């Protein structure tokens, strides 16, 4: 069972649903350790006093806020006492359409699960959100920090996804971007038509399991290779190949034409090979036919 990260309640109007918060994602990546170059000794993270470099134990560290050129020390209990309700409540402040929330705001997903006595209100909120196709906008305090959050439903669970504050999302205005519309860079109608057709040809149902972290596999293959060749402790200077530059803008129509041909060939090849489920059901039908005869 996933560890409990927070316990409290969802506040939904005058309704109250006790819940616990659980991670909805997990890290699946290579854990690179830090080593000293000359001795290959492990290098760790240290808590040190900035002025002297003296190492400090975890139990000797306190939290403080700088105010009027002085530090004001606060214990965890004092921080919670500043607003007891906020530290124990997921306070829904409104509802909105999911598509109205820019994807740039979304941060980390968590599962919400009802605790004893909260099952009915939890189910009521879940089903009401599904029926209205809305998401809840809420406030929650975790790890001594207040977060804006979205409550999003699946048929089984309510997911709390932390959101960035508006002040944390940078505006693209400082970037050198083409102006809105196709006239700014003189896009030709034919080019836009071909690009649209290419997108349609490459469109498919969302199946996240078909995507794999191939870079992780490449790194582990390199690790195995160096180990088996006895070069585990060798620091190699390798000149990485630079990818070829993309085609020039004047070749845009030709590149689109070639891309469309490639997407058509891929689709044709995929149609010839039935998906695993179809192959399995076909095998069942074939065996059933033999048994009848």
Image (spheres, rainbow, N blue to C red):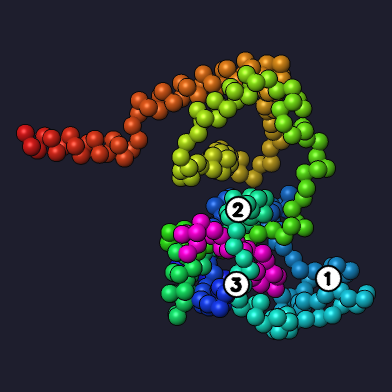
- Residue, disc 1: 49
Label located before the other in sequence (3 or 1): 1
| Cα distance in 3D space between marks 3 and 2 | 34 Å
| Cα distance in 3D space between marks 3 and 1 | 37 Å
- Residue drawn at 77 percent across, 76 percent down: 63
Q: Are marks 3 and 2 in contact (CB under 8 Å)?
A: no
- Residue, disc 3: 90
How many residues crowd around disc 2 within 10 Å: few (fewer than 14), some, or many (20 or more)?
few
User: Does 42 sit left or right of 275 as displayed?
Assistant: right
- Residue, disc 2: 31
Question: Where does the image place residue 260, in percent across and percent down from the top left?
Answer: 54, 21
How many residues crowd around disc 1 within 10 Å: few (fewer than 14), some, or many (20 or more)?
few
Question: Where does the image place residue 175, in percent across and percent down from the top left?
Answer: 80, 40
Label located before the other in sequence (3 or 2): 2
If the image is split into quadrants, where does the N terminus sit? bottom left
- Residue drawn at 74 percent across, 34 percent down: 180
The quarter of the picture where residue 140 lies is bottom right
């Amino acid at each position: 069972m996933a560890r409990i990260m927070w316990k409290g309640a969802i506040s939904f109007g005058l309704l109250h649903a006790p819940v616990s918060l659980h991670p909805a994602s997990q890290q699946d990546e290579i854990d690179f350790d830090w080593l000293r170059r000359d001795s290959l000794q492990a290098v760790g993270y240290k808590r040190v006093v900035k002025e002297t470099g003296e190492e400090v134990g975890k139990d000797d560290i306190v939290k403080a806020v700088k105010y009027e050129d002085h530090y004001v020390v606060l214990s965890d209990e004092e921080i919670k006492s500043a607003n007891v309700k906020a530290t124990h409540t997921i306070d829904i402040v409104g509802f909105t359409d999911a598509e109205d929330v820019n994807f740039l705001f979304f941060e980390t997903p968590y599962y919400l699960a009802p605790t004893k006595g909260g099952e009915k209100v939890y189910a009521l909120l879940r089903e009401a959100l599904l029926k209205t196709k809305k998401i809840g906008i809420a406030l929650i305090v975790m790890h001594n920090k207040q977060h804006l959050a979205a409550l999003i439903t699946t048929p089984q669970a309510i997911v709390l996804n932390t959101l960035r504050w508006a002040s944390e999302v940078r505006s693209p205005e400082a970037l050198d971007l083409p102006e809105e519309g196709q006239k700014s860079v003189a896009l030709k109608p034919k080019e836009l038509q071909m690009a649209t057709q290419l997108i349609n040809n490459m469109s498919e149902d969302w199946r996240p399991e078909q995507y794999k972290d191939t870079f992780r596999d490449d790194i582990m293959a390199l690790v195995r290779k160096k180990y088996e060749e006895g070069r585990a402790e060798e620091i190699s200077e390798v000149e990485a190949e630079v990818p070829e530059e993309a085609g020039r803008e004047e070749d845009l129509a030709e590149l689109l034409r070639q891309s469309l041909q490639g997407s058509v060939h891929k689709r044709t090849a995929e149609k010839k090979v039935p998906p695993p489920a179809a192959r399995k059901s076909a095998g069942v039908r074939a065996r059933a036919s033999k048994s009848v005869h």
